[in-house]
Amino acid sequence: MTEEVVAVGSQLPKGVSPGLRPLVSSGEIVRYVPIAGTHGWRDAWWSSDKSPFALMMANNGFSVIRTRDGRSFRWSTDLNGLKFWARNSDWEAGADALFYFLENVAYRDRNLIAHSHGGQVALLAASQGLKIRTLTTVGTPIRADIPVDDARRNVGLWQHIYDKHRDWFALLGQMGDREIILRRSFRLSGVLNFPLVGIRHTGVLRDETLLSLWAVNGWLTNIRNSPPHTSPPVAA
């Protein structure tokens, strides 16, 4: 069964400070791969170690996986998903690139945080056999042309964060696959859906006042505590 979790929204509990408050003071470093969304190739949340999101993650014991020359994972971020123009070629090329990027990365370090259509890149790679320890999708549009059932079989923990009321970019991103899908949650076995209010499409990645939601809602704890040594189970 899919699971919808009651998440803390933009109104934080009394006594909880926003921004860069560390979740843990010590512990093993957790490595992760941030994946940009459409036209997000210059977006600071994933590309800069000095962005508020990157600093929050570092303060909580998370480190971006990079190549030897210091590059993090990249794909074209071009617009896809329109059946009569572009289609899904860039997502597919991004999935191939992700396969190559993670080829020699241990399963325990395959923790992906994907924004918007960057989630399609991760899901296509997983549907083709890439084993992923954890996948966190943020505002990823639900589309009929993405083989999410096949992808789910290769993902250990999948948590989906989205604004349940106001995210027009996600709604627009669901068009173009000849299906009408208005829901914003993934109805798949074991997926943790976190509906929030007031985060819109990028709030939990760009807005410093919302970054503590990663600790408050347990998203970082979920990533850290996911089984690190075993491949994901095959879903029935």
Image: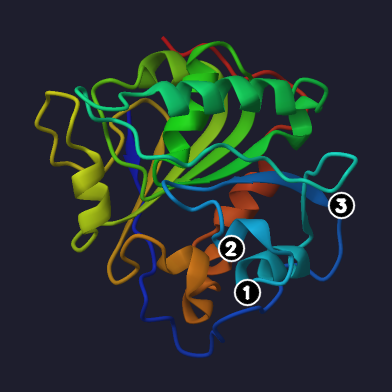
| Distance CA(mark 2)–CA(mark 1) | 7 Å
Residue drawn at x 23%, y 23% as measured from the top left: 144
* Type of the residue with mark 2: Trp
The answer to whether residue 12 is left or right of residue 134 is left
Say above or below: 19 vs 48.
Answer: below
Residue underneath mark 3:
28
| Distance CA(mark 3)–CA(mark 2) | 23 Å
Disc 2 to disc 1: CB gap under 8 Å: yes
Residue drawn at x 47%, y 40% as measured from the top left: 118
Q: Which residue lies furthest to the front in this view?
A: 85
Give the mark nearest the N terminus, 2 or 1: 2
Give the mark nearest the N terminus, 1 or 3: 3
Mark 1 burial class by Cα count in 10 Å: few <14, some 14-19, many 20+: many
Residue drawn at x 45%, y 47% as measured from the top left: 37
Judged from the image, the secondary structure of the residue bearing numbered disc 1 is: helix
Residue 106: percent from the left, percent from the top?
A: 81, 27
Disc 1 to disc 3: CB gap under 8 Å: no
* Type of the residue with mark 3: Glu
Judged from the image, the secondary structure of the residue bearing numbered disc 3 is: loop
Give the mark nearest the N terminus, 3 or 2: 3
Residue underneath mark 2:
45
Residue underneath mark 1:
52
The answer to whether residue 181 is left or right of residue 148 is left
The answer to whether residue 177 is left or right of residue 79 is left
Say above or below: 231 vs 222.
Answer: above
Corner quadrant of residue 195: bottom left
Foreground mark, 1 or 3, reads 1
